[in-house]
Amino acid sequence: MKNNSEAKLLRIFIGESDKIGNIPLYEAIVFKAKEEGLSGATVTKGIMGFGANSKINSDKLFTISNDLPLIVEIIDIENRIRDFIYTVEQMFEKSNSAGLITVEKAEIIRYTAVKK
C-alpha cells in the first residue's frame, strides 16, 4: 500500500469465546490475513457490547462474561479486502459464530515499517 492512497477498512465484530476448534476465531482471522499477505490487522477488545442476540456482555465486576466483544480491523486495497471477506465468511461458518462484517472507505496517510 502506498501513502496517500485510497483503501478499504474491514471491521469484523465477534465474541471473545468464538473459536474454530480450539483456536480463538480472532486469532485464526489475523493469522489468515497475514498468510494472505494483507497489509496488517489489529484486534481490539471491548469492555461492553451486545449484538444480534441482544445479550449484553460486560467486564464489570458483578457480571462474569467470557464473551466480551472483539473487533478485528484490517486495511488494504479494495479487491484484497473483498476477496478476504469470503474467507472470513467461511471461518464464521466453520466456527458456527455470529457477528458483523462492515467495510468502510479509508485513506492511507502513512504506512511504513520500522527501519533497522
Image (cartoon, helix red, strand yellow):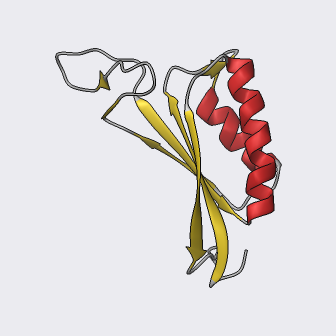
In the picture, residue 26 is in which quadrant?
A: top right
State whether residue 41 is above or below residue 85. below
- Is 114 or 64 nearer to us in this picture? 64
Left or right of 78 on screen, residue 55: left
Residue at far bottom of view: 4
State whether residue 80 is above or below residue 109. above
Left or right of 91 on screen, residue 104: left
Quarter of the image with the C terminus is: bottom right
State whether residue 9 is above or below residue 18. below
Residue 5 image point, x, y percent? 66, 81
- Is 34 or 14 nearer to us in this picture? 14
> Which residue is at 79% across, 58% downward?
80
> Which residue is at 55% across, 30% downward?
99
Left or right of 27 on screen, residue 46: left
State whether residue 113 is above or below residue 47. below
> Which residue is at 23% across, 16% downward?
63
- Is 78 or 22 nearer to us in this picture? 78
> Which residue is at 72% across, 21% downward?
93
Marks counted in the figure total 0
Is any atom of residue 116 visible in this view? no
Quarter of the image with the N terminus is: bottom right
Residue 53 image point, x, y percent? 43, 18
Residue 11 image point, x, y percent? 56, 48
Is any atom of residue 12 visible in this view? yes
Residue 37 image point, x, y percent? 80, 56
